[in-house]
Image (cartoon, grey):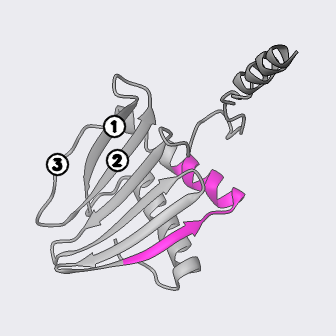
Amino acid sequence: MRQLFLVMIVGAIAACGGSYAQNTRAAEGADRGETNGRSFEFVSNKPEGDDWSIRIRDTSMSVGYGNEDTSEDLGTISLDKKETAKVWKLIDALEMSERKKGKKDEDEGYVMLRMREPGGDEGHDMITVFVSRATADEEVLNLAEYLRSIIGKYRKEKPNF
């Protein structure tokens, strides 16, 4: 009897493992914040030596500012649903995969745009594009203005990208 009881206990313990459940959160058809999800970086570099660094993942926007040898982490902003939808719509309007790589404009300054998408051989694809700060590109200007307004709203300062 004890042996039968011991076999039942061992069998019950072995069955207690559990299983991995996939994330079922819907984000309008796009995975925008998982570990290997979608992210976007907007880094403005001015010839005077100051730069703004903004990284967006899902509903989080991390902001940093640097000037030559000093840097300041302005923290992470949690975007609301409306802000999240708008910022990703503006990012998608950039059509990163259709853009030329561009080059760094050291005279006027430049903006680096980097999109990280799930997929590819290493689990993600990276697209990096450089745009002069003197650009007249409507999509880049619209995104920059919206990022300024969000940073102004949450951090009480408006960047001069």
Q: Which is nearer the N-term, disc 2 or disc 3?
A: 3
- State the residue lying farthest toward the right: 1
Left or right of 90, for residue 113: left
Q: Which is nearer the N-term, disc 2 or disc 1?
A: 2
Q: Residue 13: x and y, percent?
A: 73, 27
- State the residue lying farthest toward the left: 107
Q: Are marks 1 and 3 in contact (CB under 8 Å)?
A: no
Residue that numbered label 2 is attached to = 114
Q: Looking at the picture, which amino acid does disc 1 mark?
A: Met
Q: Residue at x 33, y 75 (%)?
A: 65
Q: Which is nearer the N-term, disc 1 or disc 3?
A: 3
Q: Does residue 58 appear in the picture of this structure?
A: yes
Category of crowding for the residue at label 2, using alpha-carbon neighbours closer than 10 angstroms: few (below 14), some (14–19), many (at least 20): some
- State the residue lying farthest toward the bottom: 156
Question: Which region of the structure is painted magenta?
Answer: 73-90
In this view, the residue in front, 90 or 113, is 113
Q: Residue 27: x and y, percent?
A: 67, 41
Residue that numbered label 3 is attached to = 103
Q: CA distance from mark 2 to mark 1?
A: 7 Å
Residue that numbered label 1 is attached to = 126
Q: Looking at the picture, which amino acid does disc 3 mark?
A: Lys
Q: CA distance from mark 2 to mark 3?
A: 13 Å
Left or right of 124, for residue 34: right
Category of crowding for the residue at label 3, using alpha-carbon neighbours closer than 10 angstroms: few (below 14), some (14–19), many (at least 20): few
The quarter of the picture where the N terminus appears is top right
Q: Looking at the picture, which amino acid does disc 2 mark?
A: Arg
